[in-house]
Image (cartoon, rainbow, N blue to C red):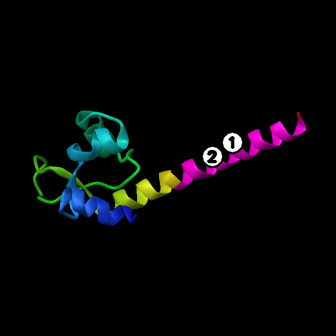
Amino acid sequence: MNTLFLLMAEFNTPNIELSAVSQKYFGMSPATAEAKANACKLPVPTYRIGTSQKAKRCINIQDLAEYIDKRREEGRIEWEQVRTGKQKGKEHH
């Protein structure tokens, strides 16, 4: 499955409000995500569509898809390393 395609089906926009994804994809409250975004400490860039500080902070759907795919690949590599290590350990016993 294509992550970007699935995110487009879920959000129907290329500009996703940070508050809509903060808990699900970053494991933090919208307020914490907003604070981290202000300090540029999120794993993806954020921006405001409007020029007002009150405009909702957004992330680009492509950036979110790439982040999810990167985390999936990191998890797969870690899983493979642990799995391979356990299999080798079993062979010696």
Identify the residue position indicated by label 1 in the image: 82
- Queried whether the magenta region covers residue 58, the answer comes back as no
Region in magenta = 73-92
- Queried whether the magenta region covers residue 80, the answer comes back as yes
Kind of residue at badge 1: Val
Name the quadrant of the C terminus: top right
Q: Is residue 47 left or right of residue 93?
A: left
Q: Quadrant of residue 14?
A: bottom left
In the foreground, 64 or 73: 73
- Neighbourhood count class around disc 1 (C-alpha, 10 Å): few under 14, some 14–19, many 20 upward: few
| Residue positioned most to the right | 92
Name the quadrant of the N terminus: bottom left
In the foreground, 62 or 2: 2
Q: Percent from the top left, x then y, of residue 55?
A: 11, 51
- Neighbourhood count class around disc 2 (C-alpha, 10 Å): few under 14, some 14–19, many 20 upward: few
Distance of label 1 from label 2 (alpha carbons): 6 Å
Identify the residue position indicated by label 2 in the image: 78
